[in-house]
Structure formats: C-alpha cells, structure tokens
Image (cartoon, helix red, strand yellow):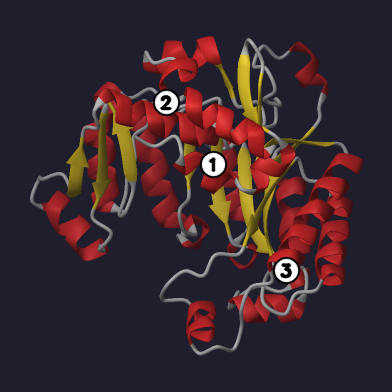
Amino acid sequence: IQALAREMDWAAPDLRPRTVFFGGGTPSLLAMSQWRTLLQTMERLGLLGAAEWTIECNPATVSRDKARLWLDYGVNRVSMGVQSFDAGMLERLGRIHTRQQAVESFDLLRSSGFQNINLDLMFAIPGQTLDHWRATLHEVMALGGEHLSCYEIIYEEDTPLFAQLQAGRCGGDEDLACAMYEELLEQTAAHGFTQYEIANFARRSPADAGSNTEGIPALACHHNVNYWRGGAYFGLGPSASGYVGGIRCKNWSNTRRYCEAWESGRRALEYEEQLPPLGRAGEIAAFGLRMNTGWAFEEFKGVTGFDLREDWREDIETLAVRGWARATEQRFQLTSQGLRFADAAAEMFLR
C-alpha cells in the first residue's frame, strides 16, 4: 500500500483521470484502514473526480462499510467476479464464494447506493452443460445488473484447472462453447442489453439516445473502451502495464520487488518499450476490431496516422471473403461470425 501510494505521488503531476479501474486481482480484499490510506492519498494528490471509477470485488469480500467508503470517495461502478451460480462450477474454478454470497453481495451493493454494477461470468468451464449456463444467465438477468462481462474460460498456468488440463482430466468442447456463446447473445438481447465488444454487454438506458459515441452504450465500461481505442493510461501497482506518451511499460509482477524499488525511490519497471508507428497502429487496429462497431476509416486515421484501406487492404479483403468482416465506404467491422474468431482476425493486422 505504501509503495502504491508512492507511485501515485510520482504519477500525479501528469495525471487527471477520466476513468479509474482498481482491478487485475481482488482489491476488495483490502482492509478498511488500507482503503482509507489509498483513498486519502488520492484525495491529497487531486486524483479524485473521475467520471467512471470501477472497483473489482469478490462476492466473499464485500462489506457495507467498504461500499459506503467507496461511494464517499466517488467510486460509482463495481465489477463483481461471480463466474457462475452453480455450486459445482464454483468448486471446479476454486472460487471461495457461494451462489448465495453472490446474490447477497449484489443486494448489499445495490442497497448501499451503487447504480452501475457489472457481473463477470465464465462459460465453457469443464463439466458445465448448456443447461448449467442457461440457468446462470437466467439468474443474472433476474438480478438486474447494468453490465455483463462474459468470457470463455482460459487455462491459466498456476491454477487448479490448468493442472487438471495437464493431467488429462478436463478439456475443451468447441461446439459446446459456440452454443453457449449463441445462448449468451440471445439472452442478453432479449433482456435489454447491447453487445458492444466480444465479451461485454451493457444494458440499454435512456442516456443512449443522446450519446455522441457511436455504438458505445452509456453504461459501457469506458475505461476498457479507452484501451480498445488506443488511448493513453497509467498502470499503477505490481504487474500493472501503462501506455503514456507513446511508451508502453510494465511494473514488476513480484510484489516484494515492486515494494523494494519504490522504498528506494526508483520506479518498479520490469521493462518499457516504444513500438514503431506502424507496429503501434497494427495493435490499435487489432484491439479496436474487438468492438462491434469496428473502426471508422477516418477515425482510425486520426488516431494512428495510417489508413486501414491502404496498409491493410489485403487483410480486409481476406476477412470479407471468409464472411468474418464487412467493409463500407466509411467503416470496417467484424461480422457476428468474425467476432467469434476475433483473435485470429486480429493477428492479421499486427505488423
């Protein structure tokens, strides 16, 4: 906490955040005294007042005192890692919360005053059936949150699932995963959500009618939209990545090493790099294609200085022939089929 406060102090002169996202782990684990230290540091440094401020939390580590403290300092969005409402799936994932805790934590956040709550879900979990997934979606819709982030499971190293995969005790079923994704699209559309990115869905709201951001709902996670659109951002804390002034950097993942660096007055950098302009433009193209709206050609040119129609003409044509993308005079975007294979499509744009 003290090291993070020092890094905030370093960043503050160049930083007036439009969005803040406390995540990449479970910050709700922090004690009240630790939260007060961080929030008072932000207040002292003039880092409060972001239009969107999200905190990630685990249903087992939410409390009313923390919720009230967050609200007092301007936090206005919570992202809760539910993953599933099925007890067997939660056990398979090694989650410490129960279905009941997830429901109670949602109700606690709502009654405390949060009007923008995201729920994280996973599908294609080993052993999960389409009926399991359908039941979880029904429960989520009944809760009435404003946002959903739904990810097909990834086998990360150093997790129980990865060990099971290595031992041959579980494996993926691509056809079932596709069926689950289609079920997700049907359920969200039927319950008033707009898909704006492969895995992200925001509930439609009256504010959408007056929005100037084409295709991006008012209740979207605008912090993430900034990533996908190639914007600048500071990454603070162990393992955090940032992109400021054309330079990408990453902090040490090892927490002890991170703390020791700041205790001695040094930035805790593992590395920093500056991509050549075309390489960075290719990255921005790839990330932007994750969004349903894709890229308006003139917008992409304004952001990167490059023209998709010139530098990626053959790639655009290849994807269109496959049925994975469509291009008009103004815009290039992936089709619904292309979004299902967005990673493969994105690779074509990297330079």
Q: Nearer the viewer, residue 66 or 145?
A: 145
**Horizontal and vertical percent for residue 280?**
33, 29
First of labels 3, 2 by sequence position: 3
What is the C-alpha distance between the residues marked 1 and 2? 21 Å
Total number of numbered labels?
Answer: 3
Three-letter residue code for mark 1: Ala
Q: Are marks 3 and 1 in contact (CB under 8 Å)?
A: no
Label 3 crowd bin: few (<14), some (14–19), many (20+), radius 10 Å: some
Can you say whether 106 is above or below 72 in the image?
below
Secondary structure under the numbered disc 2 in the rendered image: loop
- Quadrant placement of the C terminus: top left
Q: Nearer the viewer, mark 3 or mark 2?
A: 2
Q: Which residue is mark 1?
A: 345
**Horizontal and vertical percent for residue 171?**
61, 78
The disc placed on residue 101 is 3
Choose top left, top right, bottom left or bottom right for residue 178.
bottom right
Q: Nearer the viewer, mark 1 or mark 2?
A: 1
Q: Which residue is mark 2?
A: 231
What is the C-alpha distance between the residues marked 3 and 1? 39 Å
